[in-house]
């Protein structure tokens, strides 16, 4: 009833190809953004901002990056953790070597550096596919983490091997990193930054380059025959995906945790991000957000559920149970909807269009 | 295997080992801090080979399942952990280890049936990546499940395999070569296991059916091979292989959570040997084991050590660039 596009006529190609062609969607998005920008920082407790919303935004960024590579270009990667580590350590070295460099520029440059590393480890994708490639990207994962862990140059010879984000201001004396940064500032910055990056990603996938990726994903040989160069398409996917993942790593180290060691970016981080895009939906920017929200919220729910229900279980047992429930839920989700939460959302919208009539 | 490939391997392997040895000895003569002697090199090599057998044991389980159902079973590692935990738990309850082995094998068969019913059957015809994710789900579930039941303390699995280092070939090399007898036993067990599997695949009715399924699912179905039964059988066999691997790894390093992560070490073995080849899993395991041991001991010190973490992957990556299907894998032919 309320969600109907009847009467919304489009008079230009631009309007027809808009990201949100339906007016109700645009209104909903504006309301959502307004809530996220104004209401959340005002009313949410700092605990919520710090432990749920900030990691959610950082992970969304990583999930968008991996989704560009795996969901849109079809190249399975298990090296996400390694690329995140790249971003974090590049940003650390840049911001300590050039203190006058603006922090946003540092993030973008570290993403650029990670993009080069991504191209390097993307070269095998020209010869191998599928699981062979996935295992090849594991080489990136293990090698990069080992490198950042082993050579003290990367952490400026800190004895513990931990890098701590130096305090840097966004502008004036509004600090984005370091102890003076408030959760509200961190959240607002991340919100704007991630929203802009997501918009860029969405437009990339709708443009020429995104179409070549999808052609490669659907059938690489056929794509080659119609004139798409696999070398350019695959390596650009690796580069842009690594750019996003690198920035998310830098955001993780600088804004979310503040201090981090290389081992925080181990193989589990890679799997975590992979789960996000599979549960959220492969080949969907919205799915990256939904998946990130799901994976960030689930452990928090699981660890708080027993106390909420008044059960007394030892901490150790809870952590094992968490593993079990996590695994079971993943299997459940894959069986019920293999195309992820984004697909559920789409089905819901289709239903809503007709509601309350059956046809 | 054709005679030609066999002869290439027979001449190639000693040549490669010799070449690496000579390269090292050359480096040693140029750089006095680089330690190298031939007996030490061979000792490291043999230790690596025996370690490689252990990798092969884990990789075998992967290959079995991949061949029959083209599912890349990431949960193999946690199956190893789960089997070892169950076995230790049963032994602690007072069972003799042979009895515990039989009971655990039964548990693994039940697990295979459960996985087939609950996970695989509803997901037939899904893309490979979805199946892969489902096995990661199984990985998490089994990890949590095993530790919920049996606890997460490091347990000792002792079924009476001697662990003393022994000297072999004392007559041949000066001072002899130091070999861990436990590794030797593991190698023998691995060989026996592979022999049993080969006989099972070659000469039994079910084995023939398994090979048919591995060749072509639809053709197998059309001649009346029950696919679902085959999947249960193959997951059970993989479970029992996991049990043997679990006993060996558990006896060597103790039964603990990290056991599940050896699955990650089996992955480069797989791409080196090819996902669909049992001999590939064995040879791949040997190459990876020997390669990473030699690299760690002789080259690790040059770059700061602990290169074991990634050396296997890099080795596999290099092989992939030249032979995308692995050493023994079937050549990948694609048609549009």
Image: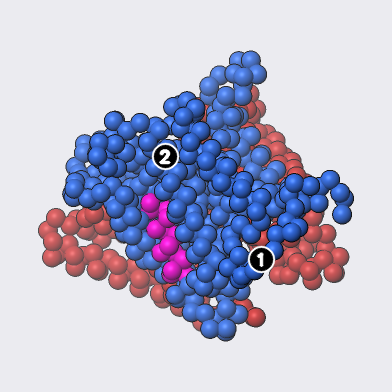
Question: Does residue A237 show up magenta in the picture?
Answer: yes
In the image, the segment drawn in magenta is A234-247
Q: Residues within 10 Å of mark 1 (few under 14, many from 20)?
A: few
Residue nearest the observer in this picture, A356 or B199: A356
The chain letter of the red chain reads B
**Magenta region, main secondary structure:** helix
Question: Where does label 2 land, which residue?
Answer: A188
Residue at 65% from the left image edge and 54% from the top image edge: A23
- The 10 Å Cα crowd at callout 2, few under 14, some 14 to 19, many 20 or more, is some
Q: Quadrant of the N terminus of chain B?
A: bottom right
Looking at the picture, does residue A57 appear above or below residue A324?
below
**Displayed quadrant of residue A110:** bottom left
Tell me the shade of chain A.
blue
Residue B188 covered by magenta stretch: no
From the image, tell me which residue sits under label 1. A10
The percent coordinates of residue A145 (x first, y second) are 35, 49
Q: Secondary structure at mark 2?
A: helix
């Amino acid at each position: 009833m309320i969600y109907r596009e009847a009467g919304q006529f489009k008079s230009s190609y631009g309007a027809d190809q808009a990201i949100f062609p339906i007016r109700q969607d645009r209104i909903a998005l504006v309301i959502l953004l307004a809530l996220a920008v104004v209401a959340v920082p005002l009313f949410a407790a700092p605990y919520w901002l710090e432990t749920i919303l900030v990691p959610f935004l950082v992970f969304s960024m990583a999930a968008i990056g991996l989704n560009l590579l795996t969901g849109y270009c079809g190249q399975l990667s298990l090296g996400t953790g390694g690329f995140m580590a790249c971003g974090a350590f590049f940003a650390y070295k840049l911001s300590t070597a050039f203190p006058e460099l603006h922090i946003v520029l540092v993030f973008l440059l570290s993403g650029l550096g990670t993009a080069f590393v991504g191209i390097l480890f993307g070269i095998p994708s020209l010869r191998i596919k599928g699981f062979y490639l996935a295992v090849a990207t594991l080489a990136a994962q293990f090698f990069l983490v080992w490198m950042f862990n082993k050579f003290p140059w990367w952490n400026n010879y800190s004895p513990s091997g931990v890098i701590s984000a130096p305090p840097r201001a966004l502008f004036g004396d509004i600090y984005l990193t370091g102890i003076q940064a408030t959760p509200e500032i961190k959240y607002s910055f991340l919100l704007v930054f991630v929203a802009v990056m997501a918009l860029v990603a969405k437009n990339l996938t709708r443009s020429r380059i995104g179409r070549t990726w999808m052609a490669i994903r659907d059938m690489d040989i056929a794509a080659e025959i119609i004139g798409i160069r696999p070398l350019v398409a695959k390596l650009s996917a690796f580069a842009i995906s690594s750019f996003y993942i690198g920035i998310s790593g830098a955001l993780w180290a600088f804004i979310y945790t503040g201090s981090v060691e290389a081992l925080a970016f181990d193989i589990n981080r890679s799997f975590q991000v992979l789960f996000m895009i599979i549960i959220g939906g492969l080949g969907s920017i919205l799915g990256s957000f939904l998946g990130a929200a799901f994976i960030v919220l689930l452990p928090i729910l699981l660890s708080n559920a027993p106390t909420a229900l008044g059960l007394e279980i030892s901490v150790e047992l809870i952590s094992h149970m968490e593993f079990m429930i996590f695994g079971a839920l993943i299997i459940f989700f894959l069986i019920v909807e293999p195309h992820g939460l984004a697909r559920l959302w789409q089905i819901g919208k289709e239903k809503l269009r007709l509601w309350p009539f059956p046809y | 295997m054709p005679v030609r490939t066999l002869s290439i391997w027979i001449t190639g392997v000693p040549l490669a080992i010799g070449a690496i040895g000579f390269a090292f000895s050359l480096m040693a003569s140029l750089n006095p801090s680089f330690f190298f002697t031939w007996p030490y090199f061979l000792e490291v090599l043999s230790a690596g080979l025996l370690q490689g057998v252990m990798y092969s044991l884990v990789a075998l389980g992967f290959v079995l399942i991949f061949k029959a159902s083209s599912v890349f079973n990431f949960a193999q590692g946690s199956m190893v952990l789960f089997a070892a935990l169950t076995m230790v738990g049963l032994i602690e309850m007072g069972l003799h280890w042979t009895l515990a082995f039989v009971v655990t094998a039964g548990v693994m068969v039940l697990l295979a049936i459960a996985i087939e019913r609950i996970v695989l059957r509803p997901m037939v015809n899904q893309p490979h990546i979805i199946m892969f994710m489902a096995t990661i789900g199984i990985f998490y579930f089994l990890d949590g499940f095993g530790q919920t039941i049996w606890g997460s303390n490091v347990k000792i699995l002792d079924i009476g395999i001697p662990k003393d280092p022994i000297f072999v070939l004392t007559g041949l090399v000066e001072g002899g070569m130091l070999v861990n007898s436990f590794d030797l036993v593991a190698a023998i067990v691995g060989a026996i296991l592979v022999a049993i599997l080969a006989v099972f695949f070659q000469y039994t009715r079910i084995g023939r059916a398994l090979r048919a399924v591995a060749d072509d699912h639809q053709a197998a179905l059309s001649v009346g091979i029950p696919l679902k039964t085959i999947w249960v059988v193959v997951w059970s066999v993989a479970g029992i292989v996991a049990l043997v691997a679990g006993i060996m790894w558990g006896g060597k390093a103790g039964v603990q959570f990290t056991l599940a992560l050896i699955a990650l070490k089996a992955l480069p073995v797989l791409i080196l040997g090819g996902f669909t080849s049992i001999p590939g899993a064995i040879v791949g395991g040997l190459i990876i084991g020997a390669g990473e041991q030699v690299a760690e001991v002789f080259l690790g010190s040059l770059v700061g050590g602990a290169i074991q973490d990634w050396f296997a992957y890099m080795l596999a990556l290099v092989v992939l660039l030249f032979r995308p299907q692995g050493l023994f894998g079937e050549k990948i032919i694609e048609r549009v």
